[in-house]
Image (cartoon, rainbow, N blue to C red):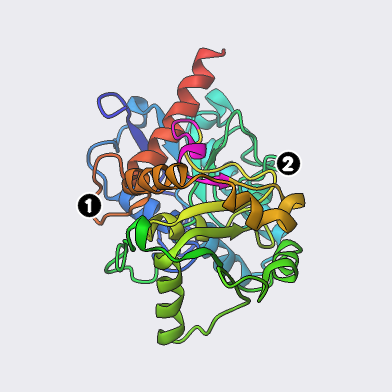
Amino acid sequence: MELLLKVFIYKEGEKPGFHQPYMRGIYASEGWFLKLMETNKKFVVRNPKKAHLFYLPFGSKMLRHTVSEQSSGGKKDLEKYLNTYVGLISRKYRFWNRTGGADHFLVACHDWAPYITGRCMKNCIRALCNANVGKDFKIDKDTSLPVTYIRSAADPLKDIGGKPASERSILAFFAGGMHGYLRPILLHHWENKEPDMKIFGPMSRDIEGKRLYREYMKSSKYCICARGYEVHTPRIVEAIFYECVPVIISDNYVPPFFEVLNWEVFSVFVQEKDIHNLRNILLSIPEEKYEAMQLGVKMVQKHFFWHKIPVKYDLFHMTLHSIWNKRVLQVKTR
């Protein structure tokens, strides 16, 4: 990929929906990729005739802000807005019509992204945070984008790391809002039930509350990553940041970079129906296997880091590689 791949970025599209990255918060992945892609000199070409891939440079978070100023900002309005954009580039350039958009890609983290791109960009390669294989995510053409909750755009890697495996006294930790149907079930079974299961609702969002949240992750063997309203959660990458083995409870969720990473080596998958048996499942894992998984978390950390200047094998390169991989596979199957 590093030797061959060339990407053309469309200049069309008005800010803030297009060309304006959102660098903090839960939707930061799409913003960091947009920022790093548009400033890249290695992969980006000015001549579209030399490109293998064509980037649609919008941010789903910022797009909703843009459209809400013009209308209600609902799903239908965003879908209509993107459809108009596709019409614009297809009339101005020949590249969309050449493949029906199959060599075009988008990177989007908002919950609505699979829906609002599902028709007008149905042939595109989509890097999506909301990777629900049971709904709108197409595993043969889409790729799963990690949800990275960035608290500081100036220092996205602040506070990473955690205690050694031997010093983690908490078996499992979860804290968060009661989003969706699954988290209330998690608390029903495990809140205040066992001393080694630190399962809470939302914690304080002040400085001390955020520090305590990080300390729990840094001190726990397993971090519970239970789905919210949708299948994805930033806790998966947070767990990796703090060297805590992720326990993913989200049926139909496709984990990031599944094409190249063996998630079973460094994480645990628990079916939603088995949440009542969560503690027994974790206790049944031998200590040697836990230590190997925690070591695996440390080894894959580098793939989930954003850097202001991209570094080989980091999150920017991994995302671009996943998109490139989908394109290569599409070409081979034709």
Q: Are marks 1 and 2 in contact (CB under 8 Å)?
A: no
| Residue 333 pos. (x, y %) | 56, 14
Residue 267 lies left or right of residue 123; in this view the side is left
* The N terminus sits in image quarter: top left
For the record, the magenta segment spans 259-268
- Closest to the observer: 33 or 85? 33
Residue shown at 50% from the left, 28% from the top: 326
Residue shown at 31% from the left, 45% from the top: 314
Which mark is nearer the camera, 1 or 2?
Answer: 2
Residue 288 lies left or right of residue 70; in this view the side is left
Q: Secondary structure at mark 2?
A: loop
- Closest to the observer: 215 or 96? 215
How many other residues sit within 10 Å of disc 1, few (<14), some (14-19) or many (≥20)?
few
> Residue at label 2?
134
- The image quarter in which residue 218 lies: bottom left
- The image quarter in which residue 41 lies: top left
Which amino acid type corresponds to the residue marked 1 in the rendered image?
Ile
Residue shown at 50% from the left, 39% from the top: 263
| Residue 47 pos. (x, y %) | 31, 32
